[in-house]
Image (cartoon, rainbow, N blue to C red):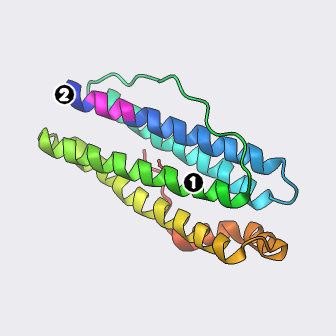
C-alpha cells in the first residue's frame, strides 16, 4: 500500500509526464506547419507518445499498489516558437526539469522506506539519462548548424538517426 505522501508525489509526476506529452505534441504541431520539417514533426509526435506511455506506467503502478491515480487538469503548453533552436532548447529544459523531479521522487521513496517504489523509479532514472543525453545531442547539432538552411535540411533528415545514436534502448515498460 502506498503512503499518502508517496501517492501524492507520484500523482504530481503523472501530471508532469502528461504535460510533457502535451508540450511535445505542441512542438510536433508547430513543426508540421513549417516548410520541410517532416523529420522534426515525426520526432515530436513520437516523443509525445512516449511521454504518454511514461504517464500511463505511473498511473498503473499507483493503482496496482492500492493508491488512486488522479488524471490531472493540464496547463496549455507553449504552442509557437521563434525558431527550431528555440524548440530544442525548450525540449532540453523540459527534460532537465523532469530529471530533477524524478531524482526528488527517488529520494523521497528512500526516505519513506518505500523500496518497491524506489525500485519502480529506477526505470525512470535510466530513461532520463537517455532523454537528457538525446536533447543535449540535438542542441549541440543545431548549434553547429546555426541558420544554415542546408544544415537544417540535413538535421531534419537525420533526426531519427540521432535518436538511435543517443538513445539505443528506448524500451516500453508495462
Ligand atoms: Fe518522461 Fe521525457 O520525461
The mark found on residue 109 in the picture is none
Q: Tell me: 88 left or right of 35.
A: left
Bounds of the magenta segment? 7-12
Mark nearest the camera among 1 and 2 is 1
| Sequence-first tag of 1 and 2 | 2
Q: Is residue 77 magenta?
A: no
* Residue 64 seen in the figure: no
* Residue 81 seen in the figure: yes
Measured as percent of width and height from the top left, residue 100 is found at 35, 50
Q: What element carries label 2?
A: loop
Measured as percent of width and height from the top left, residue 87 is found at 66, 54
Q: Does the magenta stretch include residue 10?
A: yes
Image quarter hosting the C terminus: top left
* Nearest to the observer: residue 21 or residue 82: 82
At x 57%, y 41%, the residue is 21
Q: Give the quarter of the image for residue 60.
A: top left
Measured as percent of width and height from the top left, residue 82 is found at 74, 51
Q: Tell me: 123 left or right of 86.
A: left
At x 44%, y 54%, the residue is 96
Chief SS of the magenta region: helix
Q: Few, some or many C-alpha atoms within 10 Å of disc 2 (few <14, some 14-19, many ≥20)?
A: some
At x 45%, y 32%, the residue is 15
Q: In this view, does 118 lie above or below 43?
A: above
Q: How many marks are shown on the rendered structure?
A: 2
The mark found on residue 3 in the picture is 2
Name the residue that disc number 1 marks: 91
> What is the CA distance from the residue labelled 1 to the residue labelled 2?
32 Å
Amino acid at each position: 500500500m502506498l503512503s499518502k505522501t508517496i501517492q501524492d508525489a507520484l500523482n504530481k509526476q503523472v501530471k508532469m509526464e502528461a504535460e510533457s506529452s502535451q508540450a511535445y505534441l505542441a512542438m510536433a504541431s508547430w513543426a508540421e506547419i513549417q516548410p520541410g520539417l517532416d523529420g522534426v514533426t515525426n520526432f515530436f509526435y513520437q516523443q509525445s507518445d512516449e511521454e504518454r506511455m511514461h504517464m500511463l506506467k505511473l498511473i498503473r503502478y499507483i493503482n496496482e499498489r492500492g493508491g488512486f491515480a488522479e488524471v490531472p487538469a493540464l496547463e496549455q503548453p507553449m504552442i509557437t516558437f521563434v525558431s527550431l533552436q528555440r524548440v530544442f532548447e525548450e525540449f532540453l529544459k523540459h527534460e532537465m526539469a523532469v530529471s530533477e523531479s524524478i531524482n526528488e521522487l527517488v529520494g523521497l521513496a528512500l526516505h519513506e522506506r518505500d523500496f518497491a517504489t524506489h525500485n519502480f523509479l529506477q526505470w525512470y532514472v535510466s530513461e532520463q539519462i537517455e532523454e537528457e543525453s538525446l536533447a543535449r545531442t540535438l542542441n549541440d547539432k543545431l548549434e553547429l548548424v546555426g541558420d544554415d538552411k542546408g544544415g537544417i535540411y540535413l538535421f531534419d533528415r537525420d533526426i531519427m538517426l540521432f535518436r538511435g545514436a543517443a538513445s539505443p534502448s528506448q524500451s516500453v515498460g508495462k
